Image: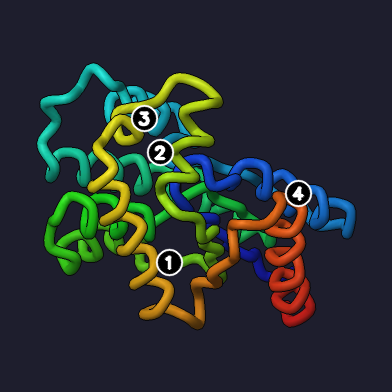
Amino acid sequence: MKQGLFISVEGLDGSGKTSCIKAIRKYLEDNNEQVVVLREPGGTNIGEQIRHVVLNPKNTEMDDVAEMLLYASSRAQLFAEVIKPTLESGIIVICDRFIDSSVAYQGYGRGLKIDDVYQVNLTAIQNRLPDVTFFIDIDPETSLRRRFNESETDRLENEKMQFHEKVYRGYLELCQQHGNRIKKIDGSGSLQDISDAMIEEIKKIVRGR
């Protein structure tokens, strides 16, 4: 049985993650791979309930640590219920956000201790990091402008620009610290260019499975 492959896609809201994930999925399925696509927070019954709480724009009084723990709780349920058994079945998992989101948003963005964020979330995912993570590199102003033009915004998207700039700088630091796993993709081009760059990286990994 082939090993499962775990792919996560990161970026600020409005960076094009959803469209690129669709393109990656199509490429893999066209090449006879089984693929499961998930989103965070969510992906399970329990996770979707947590998503409603943590992203609800009315919950402006939410404590930063509570926010971190809610994300980690959703992630723990998703990993145990879906990700782990799917990978063990040899199926490819693509996750829209994963542990790096918590480090970027709650660690760098909220100013919580990075080590604390890692410790909580590594416990949640049983120390199983993605095999490859793609970070779509686009500046906060551009990404949020796209997001605001699309639909209603959630609680985190409604944060001030200073918060999103901290998150963005956090992602850039993560790319430097974990360059073997996190692949920075230029987000200034077309969605086709971005997804093609991801697919080229995936081709290398799939060949080595």
Amino acid identity at mark 3 = Arg
Question: What is the secondary structure assignment of the residue under circle 1?
Answer: loop
| First reached walking from the N terminus: tag 2 or tag 4 | 4
How many angstroms separate mark 4 from mark 3 (CA)? 25 Å
Question: What is the secondary structure assignment of the residue under circle 4?
Answer: helix
Q: Please say whether residue 145 is visible from this viewpoint.
A: yes
Q: Nearer the viewer, residue 125 or 164?
A: 164
Q: Residue at x 35, y 48 (%)?
A: 76
How many angstroms separate mark 1 from mark 3 (CA)? 22 Å
- Mark 3 = which residue? 51
How many angstroms separate mark 3 from mark 2 (CA)? 5 Å
Tag 3 near tag 2, CB within 8 Å:
yes
- Mark 2 = which residue? 41
Q: Crowdedness of circle 4 by 10 Å Cα count: few (<14), some, many (20+)?
A: some
Amino acid identity at mark 4 = Ala
Q: Crowdedness of circle 1 by 10 Å Cα count: few (<14), some, many (20+)?
A: some
- Mark 4 = which residue? 23
Q: Residue at x 44, y 20 (%)?
A: 152
Q: Residue at x 14, y 39 (%)?
A: 66
- Mark 1 = which residue? 128
Location of the N terminus (image quadrant):
bottom right
**Spot occupied by residue 117 in the image (x, y as percentages of width and height):** 21, 59
Could you tell whether 37 is left or right of 114 in the image? right
Tag 1 near tag 3, CB within 8 Å:
no
How many angstroms separate mark 2 from mark 4 (CA)? 21 Å
| First reached walking from the N terminus: tag 4 or tag 3 | 4
Amino acid identity at mark 1 = Arg
